Amino acid sequence: MRTSRASTWSAAMLPRPGKDLEAAAPLSGPVFDLHVLEFGVSAMAHALEMFGSLNSAVVFAATARACGPFDQSPGRKRPVSINALAASIGRPFETTRRHAIALVEGGLIARAPGGLSVTTDAIVEPRLARFTESCHDLLVGLVEDLGKGGFVLPPTATDITYDPRSGVGIALDLILAAMESHGPREENFTRLALLLAVEWGHSRRAYAGPDGKSDPMIRTSNAARMLGLPYATTSRNIDALVARGLLTRSGAILHPVADAPAIAARAALANRARQLLGRLALCGFPMEHPGTAYIRGRMPPPDLG
């Protein structure tokens, strides 16, 4: 049962640039949440382009983190069973098995008697390499934006040389954290991605508005463009989100709903993001000069149109 205290998001929930960010700020607050959400929506768009399904993308990411080549230490090397994988991502066994088999048949993950893994050979496949490198560079962009915004970043460990493989792993962890944190709100991953895209687009336009009070106009077409989804698919899933009360609609304009589950999800994701940024610093990531860590270059934000 949804709370009766829900309200639509407004630009007033975001501080205006200027004095708010002149002094160093901790990694918290609505602007921090907005940066983390931009990473998540951008990464989901890249995942849809690569895998065609967020279920497949999440199965790949979770397998890679259980047993993959994205750590500087050889710690995570134990293959993961489909049962364990399904439990970790909160998907039914049969759904997980179906997507895992498709990834095995596509050569993106390996299957052995001990379970599933992602091998070094798999990640050199050009499309997969483009995806993992893009996720890495989205993480670099997140750190760069936080630094420019005056946020206090954790200090870089000086006793280790940064390996981008660690950054890819942490980027995949942040994608999984977004799905896990917001998952209780909507179990369908496509609808969840659309919900987050509308929330990001609404907040981004509100924050960029000239007076901070103008009503950001996010339509179904904007949501489709942000994630690269067909309009018909987007429209059907947006209708379902509106029917569930996760979005409201005024004519063609979509509005997020700031209810208790949404607030709790943002808090959970912010906490996980802080932990992962701390881990990134411990891997030797150049926090003071993040632009030097790009692999392919800075990724553009989602296309709002």
Image: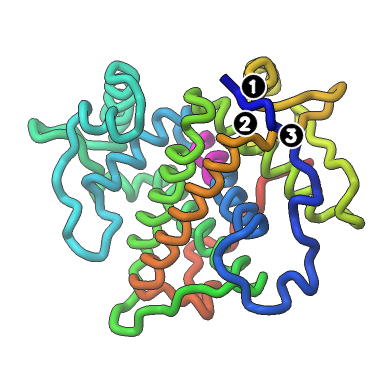
C-alpha gap between disc 1 and disc 3: 15 Å
- Give the residue displayed 16% in from the left and 50% down from the top: 77
Q: Nearer the viewer, mark 3 or mark 2?
A: 3
Q: Amino acid at mark 3?
A: Ser
| Image-based side of 218 in relation to 244, left or right | right
Please identify the quadrant where the C terminus is shown: top right
- Give the residue displayed 32% in from the left and 30% down from the top: 103
Q: How many discs appear? A: 3
Question: Looking at the picture, how far across and down is residue 279, in whole percent?
Answer: 36, 65
Badge 2 is on which residue? Answer: 194
Q: Earlier in the sequence, mark 1 or mark 3?
A: 3
Q: Amino acid at mark 2?
A: Leu
Helix, strand or loop at mark 1: helix
Q: Which residues are magenta?
A: 43-49
| Image-based side of 111 in relation to 87, left or right | left
Helix, strand or loop at mark 2: helix
